[in-house]
Image (spheres, helix red, strand yellow):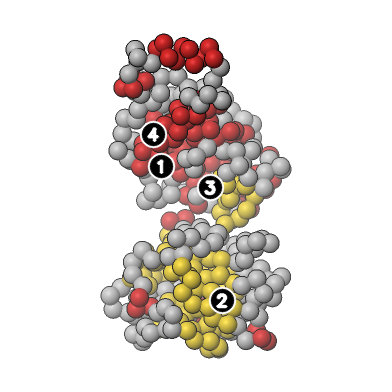
Amino acid sequence: MSVMAKALASAVKDAMMITESPKLMTSEKESELENTSAKRSQANILQLLRESPYVGFCRHAPPSPVVKFAKKPTAVNALPTFELLEGEESETPEAAALPGSIADELWATIFNYVAEVPLIPVLARVDTGFNKMLCHAAAWKGRRVIVPTGALQGLAPVLDHWLAAWELASKMVIPRSTQLLSEVNRRAPQLAVEVAWRFDTHSKGEGVQVIRDGASVRRTDVEDVVVLGDAPLVVEQDRPAFMEVRLDELDDVPAGDGLNDFGIGVTACAPEEIEDLGAVADEVPCSWIVDFSKTSVCLSVNNNLETKGVGISASKLANGDRVGVRITPKGDAVEVFINGQLCETLKIPAMQHIPASARLYPVLDLYGRAVQVSCTGAREPHL
């Protein structure tokens, strides 16, 4: 059974337990349930209506530099779905066991536990009735709606349809797009919006290639391997600046001098303000960079080595590891996380603290063993 089917089955089981609670049932329903429970087996209750057709689809179209929005909401017969991230399409789910009859509001509550934008096409294939549930505002109530970078082109024409479904969401997280941000603010001004960074196709060295709509970056040469994020890190009262990447591919033999590895950190300069990025992350202006070497990690401030730590090193990293850096609230240290665990705290000299008001942009270089790296989208460390 697929992960999606297991999640739905688990949610259905919990929902059925809720409906059987004495607090939620009238005495008449209790009597009816007792009279019929012996006649209806669990197998019959969870029997799939096999005549139900699969609905929904994933459309594959070449990317366009301009997203096109519908001027007016259009009537649709089928659920408007939109493209998934490249390489993240889910397989058609196995035949799932569906309850014979559950109220729409309860289904919407079930969906609230599993609803994610990339799962919309998957859920839409399960049953025709799921179309209505996916558009139910309760299914997304209180959730962060995260729009993947690869979904912009497909979402734009049906934006009105989905903004109505997301009206009760706690926040909408979108990749940097002036058009999309403007349209969301105009059509749903009550909806909180957060812009998530991705790798900037315009602020990078010639030795790296931005792929998967900015979700990943790949090294193509051993020189000029620095790349910036296209939006600042989100800082809130209870959430310091944090960025995290996943090491998709590491070489067995490091490129370059064989001792130093990749660098990760932040800059207080917006990408459009920087004329010369330099060859590696340390050379980016107004930057605080954690450099990984074979035996240690070092903090460089404006291309000057300031602090060294031996709690972690490049030699201890493997494919699939997540590397994150967090700026302390006072701006006096950079914390280094591996797979969500704090491994090192690098102090920043007093005269070089990171200003509290600074807008910090991600900086990365693919030196040493790093071949391909992806942004995880994490807002804070997690195991």
Who comes first in sequence, dot 3 or dot 2?
Answer: 3
Who comes first in sequence, dot 2 or dot 4?
Answer: 4
Q: What label does residue 147 carry, if any? A: 3
- The mark closer to the camera, 1 or 2, is 2
Query: Which residue appears at 53% of the width and 51% of the height?
Result: 65
Q: Is residue 285 visible?
A: no
Q: Are marks 1 and 3 in contact (CB under 8 Å)?
A: no
Who comes first in sequence, dot 1 or dot 2?
Answer: 1
Q: CA distance from mark 2 to mark 4?
A: 43 Å
Query: Which residue appears at 46% of the width and 44% of the height?
Result: 118
In percent of width and height, residue 77 lies at 50, 23
Q: Is residue 341 visible?
A: yes
Q: CA distance from mark 3 to mark 2?
A: 29 Å
Query: Which residue appears at 57% of the width and 38% of the height?
Result: 140
Identify the residue position indicated by label 1 in the image. Answer: 60
Q: CA distance from mark 1 to mark 4?
A: 30 Å
Q: Are marks 4 and 3 in contact (CB under 8 Å)?
A: no
- Graded by Cα atoms within 10 Å as few (under 14), some (14 to 19) or many (20 or more), the crowding at tag 2 reads many
Which amino acid type is marked by label 1? His
- The mark closer to the camera, 3 or 2, is 2
